[in-house]
Amino acid sequence: MSKLKIAVQKSGRLHDDSMKILKEIGISIDNGKDQLKASARNFPLEVFYLRNGDIPQYLKDGVVDAAIIGENVLIEKGNDITIVERLGFSKCKVSIAVPKSSDAKRLKDLEGKRIATSYPNTVNQFLKKQGVKANLHIINGSVEIAPNIGLADGICDIVSSGSTLFKNGLKEIEVLLKSEAVLTTSPKISADNQAIINKIQFRLKSVLKGRQ
Ligand code: PRP
Ligand code: MG
């Protein structure tokens, strides 16, 4: 029988809630802590624990059939991938922020300036849409430190509680997009595995309805 390969964030913000929702839809997973792969005991499913940023490519290549991933990562790296269901957790924004002392009030005000980000495609999309030219400085983490060390005039990163912005003396000036965890499928998914996804989706809908 066919087994659905689903990618889940290995560690980080989405991991715990992703595992929780699988449990709530009645899928129990043998979770050897250091394993990168685990099987469900009572459902035709294997979980692959992967790095967030790698998941869109695995979906495109059909290495995994489905994933629970932040919508913001899909927008950044895999916008041709289908969203099956929005999951209502790990809500966040992708925002532009500047030092508290800055006069900039919106992305447009960063014309000709330097923006540090881990989301270059997303920022470029918005810069293009708004006809703004800025210089992107791509870094993989701790983006909020960039203005303080003189690397950038503004940043674009995820805002959840807002605490990282606050601690680094930054203020949000424009929300580019809002994001939450979503269930997605590979464009290469087989008919058998699509049938498994349909079952998962059916169960998810009732769990999500119960949460409201
Ligand atoms: C993420 C993100 C923001 C912060 C937002 O960083 O890049 O910096 O969380 O959350 P908050 O609004 O609740 O403070 P993370 O802690 O994952 O570290 P990293 O950027 O170094 O990967
Ligand atoms: Mg960060």
Image (cartoon, rainbow, N blue to C red):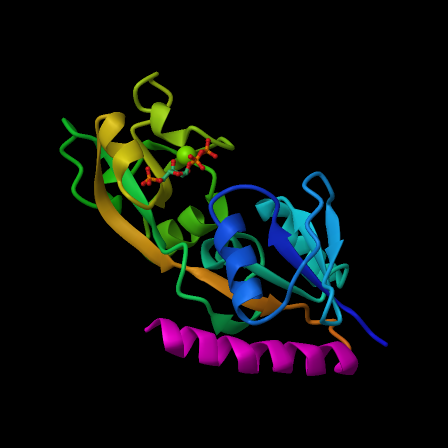
Task: Point out the image quarter for the N terminus.
Answer: bottom right
Task: Point out the image quarter for the C terminus.
Answer: bottom left
Tell me if I can see residue 128 in this picture: yes
Q: Position of residue 166 (x, y in %)?
A: 22, 31
The image shows residue 180, relative to residue 106, as above or below, that is below
The prevailing secondary structure element of the residues shown in magenta is helix
Please, which residue is most extreme toward the top here? 149
The part of the chain drawn in magenta is 191-212
Image side of residue 126 versus residue 55, left or right: left
Image side of residue 204 versus residue 107, left or right: right
Q: Position of residue 156 (x, y in %)?
A: 36, 40
Q: Position of residue 37 (x, y in %)?
A: 75, 50
Image side of residue 125 versus residue 81, left or right: left
Q: Position of residue 13 (x, y in %)?
A: 47, 45
Residue drawn where x is 41% and y is 47% of the image: 123
Depth order, front residue of 153/62: 62
Depth order, front residue of 53/182: 182
| Residue 4 lies in the magenta-colored region | no
